[in-house]
Image (tube, rainbow, N blue to C red):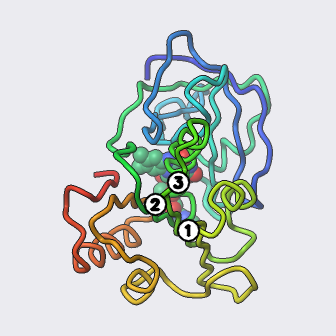
Amino acid sequence: MNQTVRLLMSQFVTHDVRHFIVSKPEGFSIVPGQGVELAIDRPGLREQGRPFTPTGLADDRVLEFTIKAYPDHAGVTQALHQLTPGAELLMSEPFGTIHYEGPGVFIAGGAGITPFLAILRDLASKGELDGQTLIFSNKTPRDVICEKELRHALGERCILTCTGAVAPGYENRRVDRAFLEERIRDFKQHFYVCGPPPFMDAVNGVLADLGASPESLVFER
Ligand SMILES: Cc1cc2nc3c(=O)[nH]c(=O)nc-3n(C[C@H](O)[C@H](O)[C@H](O)COP(=O)(O)OP(=O)(O)OC[C@H]3O[C@@H](n4cnc5c(N)ncnc54)[C@H](O)[C@@H]3O)c2cc1C
């Protein structure tokens, strides 16, 4: 980890997700969708780096992270949620394979939306959201990160599904073969997939089955 950054502020996005606004090192640049490793610069924690994805725009003068904590699990994410402004973090160089390759379907589960937030915000800033579709799966409506922004940006092409709740405006089903067959006409476009490993395995498997070529699948390898 080669740079020190400072927490400037943090605020709730959902009940268990917070945005973290962090100082941006001089000359830092990142491709939307890439991650960095972050560690809290305190004894016992500075060796515990974890990967997170900056979700702000490349030209922002600060960095934004969108981080979900697991309250019943005393991990780094929980420690991050307890930080107050001024805390110092260690940050690595950017890494990762998720980046925009062309119009397509973004399929996210839970905090897996973060690389797509970075990419979709970048596309929105360039007026290039036409032809993009988002399928975003969560347990309940209260878990949906940046819901208003995503619905506003993508309109009808923002498809939200909640596997653990029935509510108007949300599908109530898993992202499985039947769902993707119903919602997607063209399996020759790009697919971007991010979420918990079992979600990614299942979705990537179905997409391949339905005719998506391995080269058109973008996910963290
Ligand atoms: C490239 C990349 C980018 C990422 N970007 C982001 C991002 O922008 N935002 C974000 O929120 N996450 C992101 N993640 C996931 C994030 O890195 C993990 O959630 C984080 O490392 C967890 O650290 P931890 O110390 O809290 O948990 P660890 O102790 O490292 O546990 C790892 C995982 O195990 C699970 N787990 C273990 N025990 C429990 C328990 N008792 N209860 C519930 N869950 C448990 C959690 O899902 C946790 O994520 C990213 C991951 C990768 C690989």
The reply to whether discs 1 and 3 touch (Cβ–Cβ < 8 Å) is: no
Q: Is residue 66 above or below residue 63?
A: below
The reply to whether discs 1 and 2 touch (Cβ–Cβ < 8 Å) is: yes
Question: Circle 2 sits in a helix, a strand or a loop, which is it?
Answer: strand
| Left or right of residue 15: residue 43 | left
- Image location of residue 176, percent across then percent down: 41, 84
- Image location of residue 119, percent across then percent down: 50, 44
Mark nearest the camera among 1 and 3 is: 3
Going by the numbered disc 2, the residue's amino acid type is: Phe
Distance from the alpha carbon under mark 1 to that under mark 2: 8 Å
Q: Is residue 24 above or below residue 55?
A: above
Residue identifier under label 3: 130
Tell me the quarter of the picture where residue 161 sits. Answer: bottom right
Identify which residue is drawn at 78% across, 32% down.
Answer: 9
Residue identifier under label 2: 106
Image quadrant where one finds the N terminus: top left
Sequence-first disc among 3 and 2: 2
- Image location of residue 205, percent across then percent down: 26, 75
Going by the numbered disc 1, the residue's amino acid type is: Phe
